[in-house]
Image (tube, helix red, strand yellow):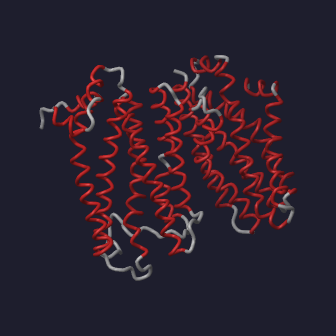
Amino acid sequence: MRDLTLAWRRRADVLSTLFFFVIVVSLFPLGIGPETNLLRLIAPGVVWVAALLATMLSLGRLFANDFQDGTLEQLLLTPQPLYLVVLGKVLALWLVSGVPLALLSPVIGIQFGLGSNTLVVLVVSLLLGTPVLALIGSVGAALTLGLRGGGVLVSILVLPLYIPVLIFGAGAVDASILGSGVEANLSLLGALLALSLIFAPWATAAALRISLE
Amino acid sequence: MAKINWYKYASPANFYPLAGKIIPWFAIPAAILFIAGLYVGFFVAPTDFQQGEAYRIIFIHVPAAWMGMLLYVLMAIYAAIGWAFNARLSSMMASSISITGAMFTLLSLVTGSLWGKPTWGTWWVWDARLTSTLILLFLYIGFISLQAAIDDQKRADKAGAVLAIVGVINVPIIYFSVDWWNTLHQGATIRLLGKPTMAPPMLAAMFIMLAACWLYAVAVVLVRLRHIILEREQHAAWSAEPVGQPSWKAEEART
């Protein structure tokens, strides 16, 4: 709840991530050319990669601000298990950046000429995938708290782990465009979500303790 | 044998000379087995029915790939032990393994690529096994970068441990990827149970090369470990002596 309130007060941060997402996605048709068939082919990948990058940008907000003003240490000392604290923060981050991103995607999908079935699959895949991205990303953000490397280091750590999510998420939308089975990809995405819900906060909590010693 | 206090070697100061003594036992057999393996692979093993002579790169490609995967698991185990038991030497071992593991993974990707061009017609394809091996390489690089970016050694070791453990799930994915997905990469020809479907000289060459790679890896990791020990234990009194010595041979002669 606290995180949601803070996010509301700093709306600019949240909105800028969304604008980044929209702008990046719009760059591709401008760079590649407006041919509709080509755009439809690349749409799933492009939207998903942009979602990945936007999520990674928003990860900076997850712990850094609290780390700087000392609140993070207080959170570590609370009687509540750190696992739940982390889960709460990631959930807030997802509600504030992942969900709007997923809900905005149909608009972008139309820009790329996707059919309405595909748009639904796109939204579902993003809704399933962005929490996974936020969860995995939280591990990277916790590991690199306060380090010199900055955003680049988080990217190096976290992008390899994002690749399966990208493959299944984009794969789901791709399958929808081609008319073949979407369920396989979506259920694998769901499995990834379940796995990361269980393990990622634990890893993040461990990483936070390590970073704050 | 029963009276040796093995825990004594958990201290970097004590392990350093032990490692020095062990290294030649691994380095020399490694060199011998490399030569033997390459000989069997290139001259004794028969020409492949489908692929002709190009298949012979398998004798480097497969051992390198196995080493890349096994070393990652080993690295994760050492890092986890170092983290759980606060054992500095284990974490140093993990750091040492990371570079060798990355090298083997890169080697497997490059040799695979060289093999793919004449046989599949392409340098690269985005199938499950190649992609997940690429991810493995990125994981190694991430581990090395993370440790390089953190100044405090203890924090670096623990952070690396978390990363290594999180990434370990990738190794079974690589291994089983050829079964789970329809892929251009060939399936497993060597199973733990059941008859292998390769000609015996080829199998022999492969295992000789694998043994050679293992011995080489142990030797190289231990050499690097000694360097890491010296680097990290600079504050300790004992470390001043070995630095003057030019090689492990000279040190062995001294002790």
x and y percent of residue B221 in the render?
Answer: 34, 43
Residue located at (43% from left, 75% from top): B54
Residue B193 percent coordinates (x, y) = 32, 66
Position of the N terminus of chain A, as image quadrant, is top right
Based on the displayed image, in which of its 4 quarters is residue B12 positioned?
top left
Give B129 or A155, whichever is nearer the viewer. A155
Residue B206 position within the rendered picture, expressed as x and y whole percent measured from the top left: 33, 66
> In the rendering, at what x and y percent does residue B83 appear?
42, 31
Q: In the rendered image of this protein, does residue B28 appear above or below residue A60?
A: below
Residue A127 vs residue B168: left or right?
right
Q: In this view, does B233 lie above or below B21?
A: above
Q: In this view, does A68 lie to the left or right of B9?
A: right
Compare residues B249 and A182 and report the one nearer the observer.
B249
Instruction: State the image quarter where residue B131 is shown.
Output: bottom right
Give me the residue at 44% from left, 81% from top: B50
The number of numbered badges drawn on the structure is 0
Nearest the eye: A81 or B195: B195
The residue at 51%/70% (across/down) is B116
Comparing B183 with A20, the one in front is A20
Q: In this view, does B9 lie to the left or right of A32?
A: left
